[in-house]
Amino acid sequence: MTEYIEPSQKHLAFIEEYLQVLEKEFKPHNLYAPILYILRQPGKKIRFNLTIKACELFGGLSEDAVYSALATEVFHNFTLIHDDVMDDASTRRNQPTVHTHWDLNTAILSGDAMLILAYEILLKQKSSAIVPILEHFTEAARVVCEGQQLDIDFEDLPVVQMDSYIQMITKKTAALIAGGMYIGALSAGASPEQANLLHEFGINLGIAFQIRDDMLDCYGERQKIGKIKGGDILQGKKTILYIRTWFSLPEEEQKRFESLYLGHSENKVDKVMKYFNQVDVKSYAIEQEQKYFDKALLALKKIEVPESRKLDLFHYANNLMGRDH
């Protein structure tokens, strides 16, 4: 199994130091306890890592982007709290979700507070490019919300086109990954042109990442993925697996598959998985993941920095594509 690269102990210490301040100085406790709960969970902190690595790619120190990285990670976890509410998900990272552990009102309000905290953290970033950093972070945050709405809209449709799915995950997942990398690059003094190339890298990496996430939801081990296996099937999510399968079936079979997928029958996940395996949708998803990852690497190749600086980011991204959770 390929392992993703953990944040360094220095960076984990920075995150914990911030959380300790939050725990000791911010009141009331009931507002911030859920925030501490989700941020202290053993997540991969991918957006945090990529923001730091984007800064280092252009010769900056990790300290130059650490607040940008933390703000991006806090915003991401805010979206998870609210996503879990909308999906009525009971577990995340093998832990009860915030609205399950506390209640719905707490999850909504603590999530709102996290959004505000993300901006407070970002404003601590010392950079001559703080205005464009704020502008780009805000744009990425808005686009994430657009992606979430598209995902919700898709639930009422029998099927969506594959390009619509790609647009949705570009907004919902890839935009924040790319946005964090863009502001990490600006923190190191990169030009907008070079930062845009890294943004392109992040968009395509984010798309590939989400395709793998969709695949692991059905084909990963529950203990490793940290949530119910087949959760997307149970919620009727229009993932790459569903869309590819629907279009691969004969017309007379499409309706039966659609009814099964959008219904609530017994053993629904197992029945849907038979359709997935019938058309070998896993192989298709892997091919598409590789296609977008190759696009990401092409953008990385165009960035005008010494090749030696690209190695860390390349290895990290490559490991993400090999993850099994």
Image (cartoon, helix red, strand yellow):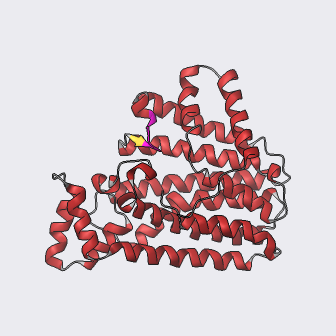
Query: Residue 119: x and y, percent?
Result: 68, 41
Point 46% across, 41% down: residue: 82
Q: Could you tell me residue 302's position as x and y percent?
A: 73, 79
Taking the view exactly as shown, the residue that stands out farthest to the top is 28
**Left or right placement of residue 147 versus residue 294 in this view:** left
Say left or right for 140 vs 324. right
* Magenta stretch contains residue 242: no
How many circles with numbers are drawn on the protein?
0
> Which residue lies most toward the front here?
1
Task: Name the image quarter holding residue 9.
Answer: top right
> Could you tell me which residue is drawn at 34 percent across and 68 percent down?
241
Image quadrant where residue 28 sits: top right
Range drawn in magenta: 92-98
Residue 33: horizontal and vertical position, in percent?
56, 27
Q: In the rendered image of this protein, does residue 223 appear above or below residue 104?
A: below
Residue 95 is a magenta residue? yes
Residue at the spot x=64%, y=57% of the render? 5
In front here: 178 or 152?
178
Q: Which is nearer the eye, 172 or 223?
A: 223
**Against 58, is 12 above or below?**
above
Where is residue 99 shown, x and y percent of the image? 42, 33
Whether residue 307 sits left or right of residue 325 in the image: it is right
Q: Could you tell whether 302 is left or right of 3 in the image?
A: right
